[in-house]
Image: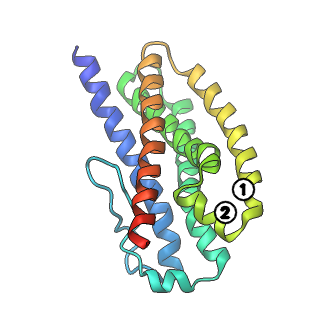
Amino acid sequence: MMRWIIYSVLGYTALFAGVWLHEIGHSFWNYKFGCKDNWIHVQVKPYIFFSTPGPVDLDQYRALPPWKRTLSAYGGVIANLFWSMVSGVLIAVVQRGHEYLLFFLWMFMTLNLSEIVSYLLIGNIYLVSDMAIVAQEYPKLRMPNFVLGLILTIAYALTLVRIPSVFQWFIIIWNIVTIVSMCGGRIVFSLLHQRAEA
């Protein structure tokens, strides 16, 4: 029982860290392009939903050239890809005897990959959030994003198969719930945002 409680706490920590780093990825480019005063300041609540790289100066953001807005939109996915690779390297280095550290690293890596897949694949089927920004600025990127999403989905599935059996199903179920929640949350967030602008 205690093991599952520890797994749950570590799972939430990995999820929160992945979402926070995703928003930092956006925030870094917003700061670099003069739309933010502090790149480390993002809005990620304990319940994780409706996280943003804000506060962002929207007037300055809207005045940016399209390629800068697009790079800012990709910033979160770039951060997720970077941190999934870092955790993959750490998994290769860590000894097998460190169960909870390995659990955290596998959870962190797969949750970062799940966020990438949820944006590039699912977020291109039903345009929301970051992928809606990219499609608005450069519509021709929609298909390459989708193809890249398919390739990364295969890599993600192969990664899930390689998780150590002691905690494999826990991580797979956590990932499935996370992807469904993230995609649903983004759809709700986008609909609320569209309603607020109307």
Amino acid type, residue under disc 2 in the picture: Ala
Q: How is the image coloured?
A: rainbow
Q: Quadrant of the C terminus?
A: bottom left
Q: In x, y percent, where is residue 178? A: 43, 36
Q: For mark 1, does the 10 Å Cα neighbourhood hold few (<14), some (14 to 19), or many (20 or more) residues?
A: many
Labelled pair 2, 1 in contact (Cβ < 8 Å): yes
* Residue annotated with mark 2: 135
- Mark 2–mark 1 Cα distance, whole angstroms, equals 6 Å
Q: Is residue 89 left or right of residue 52?
A: right
Q: Residue 119 or 81: which is nearer the viewer?
A: 119
Kindly identify the residue that appears in the image at 56 percent across and 30 percent down.
Answer: 92
Instruction: State the count of labels.
Output: 2
Residue 142's disc number: 1
Q: In x, y percent, where is residue 3? A: 27, 18
Q: Residue 188 or 144: which is nearer the viewer?
A: 188
Outermost left residue: 2
Kindly identify the residue that appears in the image at 41 percent across and 20 percent down.
Answer: 170
> Height in image: 60 above or below 173?
below
Residue 116's disc number: none
Q: Residue 116 or 167: which is nearer the viewer?
A: 116
